[in-house]
């Protein structure tokens, strides 16, 4: 449930995901033909697209920090701890 754009559910089990039927009939699309200066390729993200690189960014940060590249996700504390112990010893 939501009211004036605020989610009122206190848990995900009772949250109803919006569907195409919830989209307003009058949706206007505005294409932006100017590259985004903050991105080296000029790409712009929308909505959840911004979450896509999060796992890779975390994995790269851990690889730089620990000198070990993890190849399975999610990267759990149980996977990180032995690498940290080896790195620090």
Image: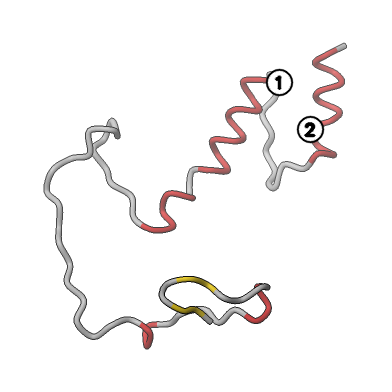
Labels 1 & 2 near each other (Cβ < 8 A):
yes
The answer to which of marks 1 and 2 sits earlier in the sequence is: 1
Rendered view: 6 above or below 33: below
Q: For mark 1, does the 10 Å Cα neighbourhood hold few (<14), some (14 to 19), or many (20 or more) residues?
A: some
Q: Residue at x 44, y 57 (%)?
A: 48
- Label 2's element? helix
Residue bearing mark 2: 80
Tell me if 13 is positioned left or right of 76 in this view. left
Rendered view: 86 above or below 52: above
All told, the count of numbered labels is 2
Taking the view exactly as shown, the residue that stands out farthest to the bottom is 21
Most foreground residue, 35 or 22 = 22
Q: For mark 2, does the 10 Å Cα neighbourhood hold few (<14), some (14 to 19), or many (20 or more) residues?
A: some
The percent coordinates of residue 72 (x first, y second) are 70, 43
Rendered view: 11 above or below 84: below
Q: Residue at x 70, y 24 (%)?
A: 68
Disc sitting over residue 4 in the figure: none
Disc sitting over residue 66 in the figure: 1
Tell me if 45 is positioned left or right of 62 in this view. left
Q: Quadrant of residue 16?
A: bottom right
Q: How is the image coloured?
A: secondary structure
Point out the image quarter for the C terminus.
top right
Q: Residue at x 23, y 85 (%)?
A: 25
Q: Residue at x 52, y 78 (%)?
A: 17
The percent coordinates of residue 8 (x first, y second) are 57, 76
Taking the view exactly as shown, the residue that stands out farthest to the top is 89
Taking the view exactly as shown, the residue that stands out farthest to the left is 33
- Label 1's element? helix
The percent coordinates of residue 44 (x first, y second) are 28, 46
């Amino acid at each position: 449930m939501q009211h004036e754009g605020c989610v009122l559910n206190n848990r995900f089990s009772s949250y109803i995901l919006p569907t195409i039927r919830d989209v307003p009939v009058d949706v206007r699309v505005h294409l932006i033909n100017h590259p985004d200066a903050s991105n080296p390729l000029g790409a712009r993200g929308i909505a959840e697209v911004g979450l896509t690189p999060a796992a890779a960014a975390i994995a790269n940060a851990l690889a730089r920090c620990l000198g070990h590249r993890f190849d399975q996700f999610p990267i759990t504390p149980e996977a990180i701890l032995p690498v940290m112990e080896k790195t620090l010893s």
